[in-house]
Image (cartoon, rainbow, N blue to C red):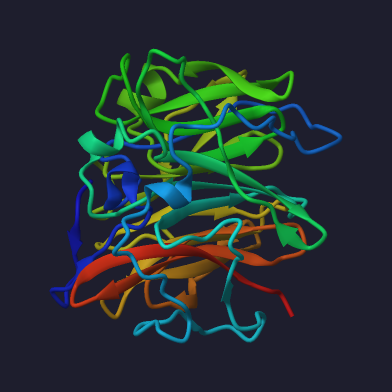
Amino acid sequence: MKKTRSKAGIILVPVAIMLAATAWSCSSPPPPKASPPKPTTTPQPTPPPTPQKTRAQSIPASAVKITPETDALPPIMHSSEFAKPVPLGNGVNTAGAEDSAFVMPDGNTLYFFFTPDPGIPAEKQLFDGVTGIYVSQKQGGQWSNAQRVMLIEKDEVALDGCVFVQGNEMWFCSARKGNSRGVDLWTARFSNGRWTDWKHAGKKLNVDYEVGEMHITADGNEMYFHSPKAGGKGGYDIWVTRKVNGEWQPPENVTAVNTPDAEGWPFITQDGNELWFLRNYKGSPAIFRSKKLGGNWSEPELIVSQFAAEPSLDNSGNLYFTHHYFKDGKMLEADIYMAPRK
């Protein structure tokens, strides 16, 4: 994945730990979704067979869990709409790297990417048996011990991440056989307690539109995504493609939120009136929000800064995001945080 240098000369750490441990955002992009069915309940995945190692067993013995008390660069909240952000419990966070969170609208199911050591190269993660997508359910107010979401057959290998789920359909980015790029968008369907029937998302989205990490509106008609494609303002920009007669149309640049630097990792609220995304702020990723006013996107406002990334909100307005722990310019691990709506 590319690193983008800001005008101040600071490298924007692309967020999402990338299956490779730097940032899961596709050098060429991540996932979209087609008109989704509206389920009456959130799909409840059946736990897959136990892998060779658990997440805890795969984390290096030398790793030391960082806490808010020992975090040298904690996230900074800039909005009075939210309470102080806190990391989720042990069912989700470990001394490894949890990233790229996606919470279902009901707030009871959380998907995320995990790798035991962000310093391990992707080619080794591919065979470690634990790096990939995980899901946790909220039970009695607590997040359950996360389970691996298997999106390959037993004799296959892949690195999967950046999940988007709507109804019974999942979009995810993957490095695997059959790709047009190093990392492509794929889809899967939820059936009989498991995610199955995974398919390549096709040339139009992966090659022609260069779609990166994405989010689709609740009505299924608009897909917002980031991309380094030509015609933008510079670096990664946020684009939108609209579905007409079942086909995604040529993307339009969301000029109101883009700058010559990098913007990306978009999230759209269920009502379609808030666009959340990332931008560099004082040398590290920060979360911004733009509101739709009179049909147009407003000037973005800063919500959370200092290594805060990949926003996702539930229907109660609680904000979930990734926080990366850095020391001396090196990423040590990452956790999923939640900032409650006041």
Q: In this view, does 210 lie above or below 332?
A: above
Residue 315 visible: yes
Residue 303 % position (x, y): 52, 76
Asked whether, in this view, residue 329 is left or right of residue 118, the answer is left
**Of residues 21 and 62, the one drawn nearer to the viewer in this rendering:** 62
Asked whether, in this view, residue 288 is left or right of residue 84, the answer is left
Q: In this view, does 287 lie above or below 34?
A: below
- Residue at image position (42%, 81%) is 74
Q: Quadrant of residue 180?
A: top left
- Residue at image position (62%, 66%) is 319
Residue 161 % position (x, y): 43, 39
Q: In this view, does 72 lie above or below 239?
A: below
Q: Quadrant of residue 262?
A: bottom left
**Of residues 3 and 141, the one drawn nearer to the viewer in this rendering:** 141
Q: In which quarter of the image is the C terminus?
A: bottom right
Residue 187 % position (x, y): 52, 24
**Of residues 189 and 286, the one drawn nearer to the viewer in this rendering:** 189
As drawn, the residue found furthest toward the right would be: 40
